[in-house]
Image (spheres, grey):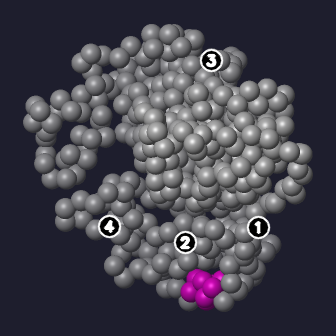
Amino acid sequence: MNGAESLVTTLVDQGVDVCFANPGTSEMHFLAALENPRMRSVLCLFEGVATGAADGWFRMRESPATTLLHLGPGLANGLANIHNARRARSGMVNIVGEHASQHLKYDAPLTSDIEGLARPLSHWLRRADTAATLAGDAVRAITAARAGQIATLIVPGETSWGNAEERKQFPIEQPRRAAPPAARVDHVARMIRQADGPVLLLLGGTCCRGPALQLAGKIAAVAGCRLATQFFTARIERGAGRVPLERIPYFVPAGVEFLEGFRHIVAVETGEPIAFFSYPGSPSRLKHPDALVHSLVEPDEDGSAGLAMLLDALGGGETNARLQQRVATPVPRGPLEPTSIALALAAAIPEGCILVDESLTTGRHSMGLTAGALPHDTLQNMGGSIGFATPVSTGAALACPERPVICLVGDGSAMYTIQSLWTQARESLNVTTVVFANNAYQILKAEFAAMGFGSPGPQALAMMDIGNPQIDWVAMARSQGVPGVSVETAEDLHRELVGAVREPGPRLIQVRL
């Protein structure tokens, strides 16, 4: 068994059985080792698709995938979505090929400082020494990734083709998150009992789904707290029958207004609410200056345990959480604009859908108007680097093949990683990609005004215009094996959404705005 075979065998023995790959010459031995029938290999035509797909996989499986990247440039191509995954605390194992050590002294064209590229976004980083130690390195990388960390393993050529000796067995180590200290929980409980105004419970991480969300709902019912999330959240279970969560608005004035009445904010697996960007004359902190932020559970602690402890301290164990009622949204009619689009989506979302949202401007109404839709999960971009939605949709669909995926993305964002459509067609994934085609970086127009410039001049406006030449999204999809359609009314959008999620395989809907 050579090193590459040892590496792949160790990955699958540890439960890492999918590889999102964009290989090159330095990864040929690993590529040969992927013949292992227990490993699913998924070809991605751009490294940012591979790393984004690994993010989507982790969010839905809570278990890491691996990526295969070609030397430093391949890693660099994937870094934007590694950044997004890191912010979402999505673990992944990045296998990065490297020249054989004896070849590095010749400074071949693809030689680069891979560690220097990987270090800022990797929690765990190692260059393998020998073929015999590669399996042990892989186990340590996987252990880090299971805990939601970015693990990067650099594999020089000789460690791939060298002799790994006998196969080794390693135990599977599951991460354990500590409960918060009892004194911290008692402090928050006393504050809630003594507060003379509303208290906001701000949820993040694992607390926006499953048992933790139910516990938060019970705390809200027994103590009268409000429940909210940051504007972007890694994964939320929402819709009818789920505990409803409010959302702090994106723009600073609206965010400040939302938080104006709170003097106490309890952070659970998240930090205090801050502005996404800094604006002249605007605060970076969105809370009222007199408001106090109390950390109940740190991001690396056990949110479910902390919320259970708080509920017990408040004496509300038998309380029932208030749940979102079903809202049967009538099919909207007429022109396409943010509200009619959100209503069409609310009426079309099937039960169990995974909604991946990167609709920066057009979809800003969708969260409020889809709150009473059938139960579904929403995944959002935690890192802000665009080109997130189509790769994450790809990984989520592979992780949960029984669940339909709807991807909402602006045309500017979609162009970053549109190669995702090819992988979706190749793998026959049930992903419906809705592209909002306003032919502009529309978000930049709003940000330009927020910076105090008013309306952009012709030169600035040209840098926000992507309509000259205009992109034909239906043709783009068809060229990659994905059927597409263009819609111009709300009723057409609803009809196409309903049909697309019922049919196997990927679809694209171009929303003309």
Q: Amino acid at mark 2?
A: Ala
Question: Within the image, what quadrant is residue 157 found in?
Answer: top right
Callout in the foreground (3, 4): 3
When the figure is inspected, residue 279 is found, relative to residue 109, above or below; the finding is below
Along the viewing direction, whichever of 311 and 329 lies nearer the viewer: 311
Q: Amino acid at mark 1?
A: Arg
Callout in the foreground (1, 2): 1
Of labels 3 and 4, earlier in sequence is: 4
Question: Within the image, what quadrant is residue 393 found in?
Answer: top right
Judging by the rendered image, the residue that carries numbered circle 1 is: 176
Crowd band around label 3 with a 10 angstrom C-alpha radius: few (<14), some (14–19), many (20+): some
Callout in the foreground (2, 3): 3
User: Does 26 appear in magenta?
Assistant: no
Please provide percent x and percent y for residue 451. 19, 53
Q: CA distance from mark 1 to mark 2?
A: 21 Å
Of labels 4 and 2, earlier in sequence is: 2
Q: Which residues are magenta?
A: 184-193
Q: CA distance from mark 1 to mark 4?
A: 34 Å
- In the structure shown, which secondary structural element does the residue marked by tag 3 occupy? helix
